[in-house]
Amino acid sequence: MNKPKIVRPEESQPAHALWFDRKKYVTINFMVQKPKDVQVDIQTDKMILCCKNDTDDVYYNELYFYDKVQIYDSRERVYDRTINILLRKIKPDYAWPRLQKDPAKPSWISVDFDNWRDWEHEEDEGKEEYDRYVDMIQEMAVSNKGETPDMGDLSDVSAEFC
């Protein structure tokens, strides 16, 4: 599957991007009003985005990823105000501390804190909560037995519905 090579236009600017990390995926949302002529090239170590907005301003972004991604399981989707890129990590369960390989952060990349989650310790916290719940149920079963409920009236109820 040969994609045409995306060439950087002479007059272009980078589109603002918000990104967040999950266990298996990294999501990047490029903020472009009514994007058209959208071209996206996702490679294992980088991606290129080129498009125009409703006023024909040209946007071009090229970024080298922090780590490798699976190109055949990565997707892009164009909406009215954004271009969403979903990148599948080669190494799942490994947090990316930044989006780019280069530690210098460009001004057009921001972290999407509304969608960010510290998922690295999520399972441990969930296990703690589950263990507390199991302990509480066991304690209730042992200490709060009380009297056995009278279920003699259940035979009357079942007779009414037959």
Image: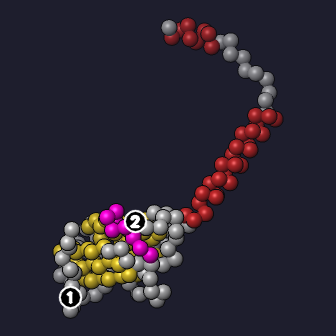
Residue highlighted by disc 1:
9
Question: How would you rate the neighbour count of disc 1 (Cα within 10 Å): few for under 14, some for 14-19, many for 20 or more?
Answer: few
User: Which residue does the image show at 32% across and 77% down from the upper left?
Assistant: 47
Q: Is residue 102 left or right of residue 36?
A: right
**Segment tinted magenta in the rendering:** 67-74
The secondary structure type at the circle numbered 2 is: strand
Q: Which residue is mark 2?
A: 88
Residue type pointed to by label 1: Pro
54 left or right of 151? left
CA separation, marks 2 and 1? 28 Å
Magenta region includes residue 122: no
The x and y percentages for residue 41 are: 27, 75
Q: Horizontally, is 106 left or right of 152 in the view?
A: left
Instruction: Give the residue type at disc 2.
Output: Arg
Q: Which circle's residue, 2 or 1, is located before the other in the chain?
A: 1
Rendered location of residue 143, percent (x, y): 81, 35
Q: Residue at x 74, y 44 (%)?
A: 135
Q: Residue furthest front?
A: 1
Mark toward the viewer: 2 or 1: 2
61 sits to left or right of 145: left
